[in-house]
Image: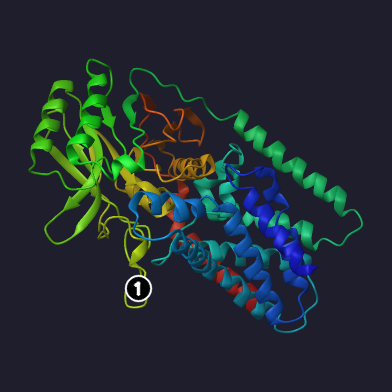
């Protein structure tokens, strides 16, 4: 029965994530899991509770990757059967579970000897241990932060203002702490306390949200012409560069004479490097006719390596900047730990890429900005480094055409909410199939295009040059949390 309740905990936590069910569930979804961890008699019981919780939570959160791997990619690329996609999904979940084992290791230290249960000490320990696991998920070749507890609260506009100070990891700590108070409280009036806690949380959320300043977008704001091309993957991966160019040309011409400062296209408009081709010559003429700078995503080939890149063209059609994707997707865009996983190349798309080695900043009318590509939005590191280098607003380009589920697209888009708040930068995402939209520096979604259709429009951002507290202390805060978790486990 205990293992079943832990399973329920994991499923409820996954259901609280964006696009699944209700975010409110996150405030009590971990209770069964935490209680079972504290009440377990030996190490293998706690080990099984960790495995059951983390696997069920990740599967419930990332279920949309299952049809992507077993149906969508095999149908388009025809490189492997659906059964391999099933094995790939299972393998991905197994790898994503690994950082959560730190909770088990710390718990073994904490419960290594009998000690008098201290409600507050126990609550703080599990909050620090769980937060440490999420910190570890950001590092290494398997890094991916989808399913972090803080992300369930993307629509809690008031509470997420804390992210500018303590980051998503701090918000995770608060979520686990609330769950711990409910799980470990044995007092007679615990139901009243629980109601009081929930009331305070939502009073605080609504109060902060109500008093946030309005963001006024005027003619002085930066106006971004966003292009949601909605090209099906079947067409994208079977067409040649001339057909892809026709998509570019048809869409850019619509901005001729319109009051925009920058036109942005999604990731992977072309699946090969078009430098020094007649297609690039055609593009330059189109850009000159519209006379607007353009951001566009396509492969870069330097003769030795391939890069997934964002290219910045000025209004004269000349390339003035390139940003190579730094945080590549394991197995799909690069092979992690190649000596061990050398037989797993079946899951790559067309080719493997080399990661970029620096965060380049682009300049538009004396305003600097950063560009990130696809799942880089899941990593605070990218946005924080771009902000530190002077970016006053952030743009993400992506190709989410692999995902038929609205849940997948919403979970990806909601990352921009946290990147905006933690850096206090307006954030814009331009996606092939959606979601395309804008988010202000307080994490409020200001505009979203209807997904799964071709769409063009203007998204507004305001420039901000100040640095948030979390941008300054993010690294040291992570170290403090891990050290604190270890100290709580030992002493």
Number of marks drawn: 1
Residue 28 appears left or right of 322 = right
Identity of the residue drawn at 29% across and 47% down: 389
Quadrant occupied by the C terminus: bottom right
Residue 343 appears left or right of 275 = right
Looking at the image, which residue sits at the far right?
Answer: 188
Label 1: which secondary element: loop
Residue 354 appears left or right of 150 = left
Is 438 drawn above or below residue 381 in the view shown?
Answer: above
Identity of the residue drawn at 46% across and 35% down: 441
Q: Residue at label 1?
A: 343
- Residue 395 visible somewhere in the drawing: yes
Looking at the image, which residue sits at the far top?
Answer: 257
Identity of the residue drawn at 29% across and 46% down: 237
Q: Quadrant of residue 244?
A: top left
For the residue pair 374 and 158, the one nearer the viewer reads as: 374
* Rendered location of residue 202, percent (x, y): 70, 39
Looking at the image, which residue sits at the far bottom?
Answer: 113
Quadrant occupied by the N terminus: bottom right
Circle 1 packing at 10 Å, graded few (<14), some (14-19), many (20+), is few
For the residue pair 489 and 403, the one nearer the viewer reads as: 403
* Rendered location of residue 346, percent (x, y): 35, 64
- Residue 491 visible somewhere in the drawing: no
* Rendered location of residue 236, percent (x, y): 29, 41
The type of colouring in the image is rainbow
* Rendered location of residue 203, percent (x, y): 71, 36
């Amino acid at each position: 029965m205990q293992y079943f309740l832990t399973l329920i905990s994991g499923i409820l936590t996954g259901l609280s994530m964006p696009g699944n069910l209700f975010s409110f569930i996150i405030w009590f979804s971990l209770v069964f899991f935490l209680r079972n961890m504290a009440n377990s008699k030996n190490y293998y019981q706690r080990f099984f509770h960790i495995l059951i919780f983390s696997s069920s939570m990740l599967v419930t959160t990332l279920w949309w990757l299952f049809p992507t791997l077993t149906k969508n990619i095999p149908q388009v690329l025809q490189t492997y059967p659906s059964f391999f996609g099933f094995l790939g999904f299972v393998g991905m979940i197994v790898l994503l579970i690994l950082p959560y084992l730190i909770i088990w290791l710390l718990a073994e230290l904490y419960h290594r000897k009998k000690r008098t249960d201290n409600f507050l000490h126990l609550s703080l320990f599990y909050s620090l241990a769980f937060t440490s696991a999420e910190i570890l998920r950001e590092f290494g070749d398997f890094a991916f932060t989808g399913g972090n507890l803080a992300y369930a609260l993307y629509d809690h506009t008031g509470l997420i203002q804390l992210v500018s100070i303590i980051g998503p990891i701090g918000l995770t700590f608060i979520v686990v702490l609330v769950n711990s108070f409910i799980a470990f409280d044995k007092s007679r009036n615990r139901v009243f306390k629980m109601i009081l806690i929930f009331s305070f949380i939502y009073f605080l959320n609504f109060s902060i949200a109500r008093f946030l300043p309005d963001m006024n977008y005027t003619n002085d704001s930066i106006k971004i012409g966003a292009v949601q091309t909605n090209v099906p993957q079947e067409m994208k991966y079977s067409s040649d560069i001339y057909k892809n160019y026709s998509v570019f040309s048809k869409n850019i011409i619509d901005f001729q004479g319109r009051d925009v400062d920058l036109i942005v296209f999604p990731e992977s408009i072309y699946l090969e490097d078009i430098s020094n081709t007649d297609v690039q010559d055609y593009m330059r003429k189109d850009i000159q006719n519209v006379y607007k700078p353009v951001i566009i995503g396509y492969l870069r080939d330097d003769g030795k390596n391939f890069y997934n890149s964002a290219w910045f063209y000025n209004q004269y059609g000349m390339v003035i900047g390139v940003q190579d994707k730094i945080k590549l997707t394991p197995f799909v865009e690069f092979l992690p730990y190649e000596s061990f996983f050398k037989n797993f190349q079946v899951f790559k798309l067309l080719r493997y890429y080399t990661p970029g080695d620096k965060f380049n900043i682009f300049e538009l009318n004396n305003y600097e900005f950063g560009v990130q590509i696809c799942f880089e939005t899941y990593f605070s590191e990218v946005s924080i480094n771009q902000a530190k280098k002077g970016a006053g607003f952030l743009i993400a380009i992506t190709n989410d055409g692999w995902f038929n589920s609205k849940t997948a697209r919403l979970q990806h888009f909601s990352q921009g909410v946290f990147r905006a708040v933690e850096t206090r930068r307006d954030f814009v995402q331009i996606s092939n199939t959606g979601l395309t939209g804008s988010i202000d520096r307080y994490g409020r979604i200001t505009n979203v295009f209807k997904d799964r259709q071709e769409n063009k429009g203007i998204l507004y951002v305001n420039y901000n040059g100040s640095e948030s507290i979390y941008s300054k202390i993010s690294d040291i805060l992570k170290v403090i949390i891990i050290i604190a978790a270890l100290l709580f486990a030992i002493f």
